[in-house]
Amino acid sequence: MSIRNWIDKHYPEPNIYRWIGIVLEGISAAVLVFLMALTCIDVAGRYLFNNSINGAFELTQIGLAVMVFAQMPLITWRGSHVVVDLFDHLFGNRIVKVLGIFSVLIVSSSFYFLAVRIYELAERSLRRGEVSEYLKIPTGYLTEYIAIMSWITAACMLTYGAYRVLKDDTESQPLGD
């Protein structure tokens, strides 16, 4: 299979959205590989040489934040959230769509206002010069990243999430799609 066919198969989004997805998943994959290597080296150093890596815990926390918040817009855009549809078969299609639009509005507005507050905290952290405990990494930049990715997630939910709810798709999708 050529690289182009692989990209077409795994990234069905159009144009720029496809490349944004590739970049965000590349960031997440690189951070995950870094975290695996860091953990292996840290554990080996602790048990074989009685010396661990200074700041490994901080680097793990930062890596997890980068990885999770890089995936949030993609999960939202692709509609890969966990969905519990216990009562969908009891309600009509119209009521399910109204509830879906309601949830899209609640989730997108929640992410938006949460991101506003997180960004305010990031600005305050940068003004005060707050840094991490051991490695002295400025925490405000990571907090700004979290706020920006939360805004992008809110936009993805509001646009494509609403589109997915409103499109005429009455058949349920199999697990994993």
Image: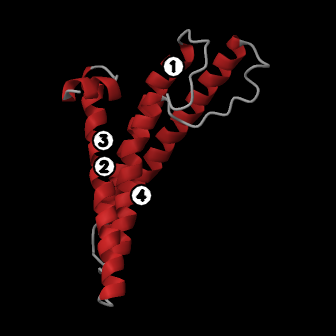
Q: Percent position (x, y) of residue 128?
A: 32, 68
**Residue found 41% across the figure and 50% down from its top:** 68
Answer whether labels 1 and 2 touch (C-beta < 8 Å): no
Q: Nearer the viewer, residue 143 or 86?
A: 86
Q: Residue lying at the far top in this picture: please name it.
A: 168
Q: How many numbered marks does the figure carry?
A: 4
- Check disc 3 and report the residue beneath it: 24
Using the rendered view, name the quadrant where residue 11 is placed.
top left
Q: CA distance from mark 1 to mark 3?
A: 22 Å
Determine the CA span between mark 1 and mark 2: 27 Å
User: Quick one: label 4 or label 2, which is nearer the N terminus?
Assistant: 2
* Amino acid type for the residue under numbered disc 1: Arg
Which mark, residue 121? Answer: 4
Q: Earlier in the sequence, mark 2 or mark 3?
A: 3
Residue 37 lies in quadrant: bottom left
**Residue tagged 2:** 29
Q: Position of residue 115 (x, y in %)?
A: 44, 45
Secondary structure under badge 4?
A: helix
Judge whether 107 appears above or below 142 on screen.
above
Left or right, 31 with reference to 3: right
Residue for badge 1: 164
| The furthest residue to the front | 1
Q: Earlier in the sequence, mark 1 or mark 3?
A: 3
| Amino acid type of the residue that numbered disc 2 sits on in the rendered structure | Ala
